[in-house]
């Protein structure tokens, strides 16, 4: 039984991850706007405060972050920054600041998404951010100290999100959040590092 | 004969790109701190001003950008931002703002580097940025209008840079800047889009 923090625990995917991990672990659920523990992962101060509250843990999972969707010909520099600040640095901040709060042999598991591998219309910001996360996991896996591992989960579109996203994902086969959540157990309980677990594609 | 802008023309790679492209094209050389035309590509205003000066072109090449090198356990959030602001957004800014200054059928060619594929010690920021650029090219290639193409050149370490970088690149086989520069001709004069041209690995 490990002590696991799930950041973004109140989202569609986060709830499924929490359900999956709670079968065998102590899970501290952290929301961005809801729940007993909250963090704004775009704000380093807020992350520091969270970890000072909860102390050392065995695994840190992040399933947060927004990106900007919109047509490239009209995309502004400021719109492009949205995904970098939020989904990208929101997760990287947690690693940079959280590494000292991980026990030896602990793990990070971050979240990207299929749009990194399979670009869609209006998705240039998402493809950039998801590939950046893959790069971060690849680069940091060889440097994390004390046997700390880091992996990335890249799910295809979720069944639960198809109402909102179907027009962007015609012909994509969605997976349930519960199925995507299995990959987080593989990362948290497995021995691999620097891996991208692609789910449903 | 095309009208080509090379941003970062005064660097080691930029000089070689300019030499290569000048064999067959009109090249406008743009430096960051030197030369007749200058741009700070991290500053959207500066990019706008550059393109207002030089007007419409057939190809835009970028070979600029710094990243932060340093050990991951000590890396600060602010240090991580260096590569995102400079090498990543410095090139993406040029695409977002420069697309309207490209003639129909024009092209962008951006620059990443081998550390995206082959992580090295102290290179997590570089791996992240280089993979993000790959994502941006992949995502934007399917959306650019009017037959505009976009490709990425990812060279291994340059012979000319080995004095400074050799300790980070033990066992890597460097290539000359002149050889890396050939890939820019492939991108500018070829017909492909969304490609990553890996040079020397």
Image: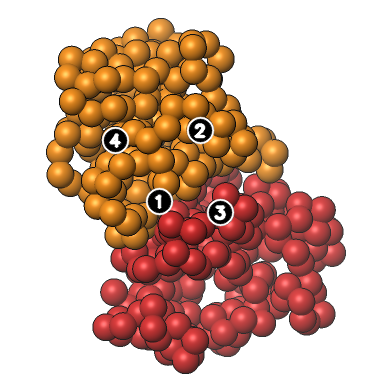
Chain colours: A orange, B red
Q: Which of marks 3 and 2 is in front?
A: 2
Does mark 2 fall on the same chain as mark 1?
A: yes
- Residue B105 locus on image (x, y percent): 56, 55
Q: Looking at the image, which residue is at 49% across and 44% down?
A: A97
Q: Looking at the image, which residue is at 27% across and 47% down?
A: A104
Residue A100 left/right relative to A16: right
Q: Is mark 2 on a helix, strand or loop?
A: helix
- Residue B145 locus on image (x, y percent): 57, 42
- Do the numbered discs 1 and 3 sit on residues whose CB atoms are within 8 Å? no
Q: Mark 3 points at which residue?
A: B76
Q: Does any portion of residue A90 appear in the rendered image? A: yes
The quarter of the image holding the C terminus of chain A is top left
Distance Cα–Cα, label 1 vs label 4:
20 Å
Does mark 3 fall on the same chain as mark 4?
A: no
**Residue A58 bears which disc, if any?**
4
Vertical arrangement, residue A193 with respect to residue B162, above or below: above
Distance Cα–Cα, label 1 vs label 2:
25 Å
Vertical arrangement, residue A100 with respect to residue A13, above or below: below
| Label 1 vs 2, first from the N-terminus | 2
Q: Name the residue under label 1.
A: A136
Q: Which of marks 1 and 4 is in front?
A: 4
């Amino acid at each position: 039984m490990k002590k696991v923090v799930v950041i973004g625990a109140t989202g569609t995917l986060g709830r499924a991850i929490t359900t999956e991990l709670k079968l065998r672990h102590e899970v501290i659920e952290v929301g961005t706007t809801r729940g007993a523990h909250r963090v704004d992962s775009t704000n380093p101060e807020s992350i520091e405060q969270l970890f000072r509250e909860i102390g050392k843990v065995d695994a840190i999972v992040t399933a947060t972050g927004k990106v900007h969707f919109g047509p490239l010909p009209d995309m502004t520099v400021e719109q492009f920054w949205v995904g970098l600040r939020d989904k990208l640095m929101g997760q990287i901040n947690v690693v940079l600041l959280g590494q000292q709060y991980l026990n030896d042999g602990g793990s990070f598991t971050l979240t990207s998404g299929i749009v990194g591998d399979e670009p869609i219309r209006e998705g240039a910001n998402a493809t950039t951010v998801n590939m950046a996360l893959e790069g971060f996991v690849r680069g940091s896996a060889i440097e994390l100290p004390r046997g700390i591992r880091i992996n990335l989960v890249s799910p295809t579109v979720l069944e639960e999100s198809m109402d909102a996203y179907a027009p962007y994902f015609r012909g994509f086969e969605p997976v349930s959040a519960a199925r995507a959540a299995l990959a987080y157990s593989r990362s948290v309980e497995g021995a691999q590092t620097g891996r991208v677990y692609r789910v449903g594609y």
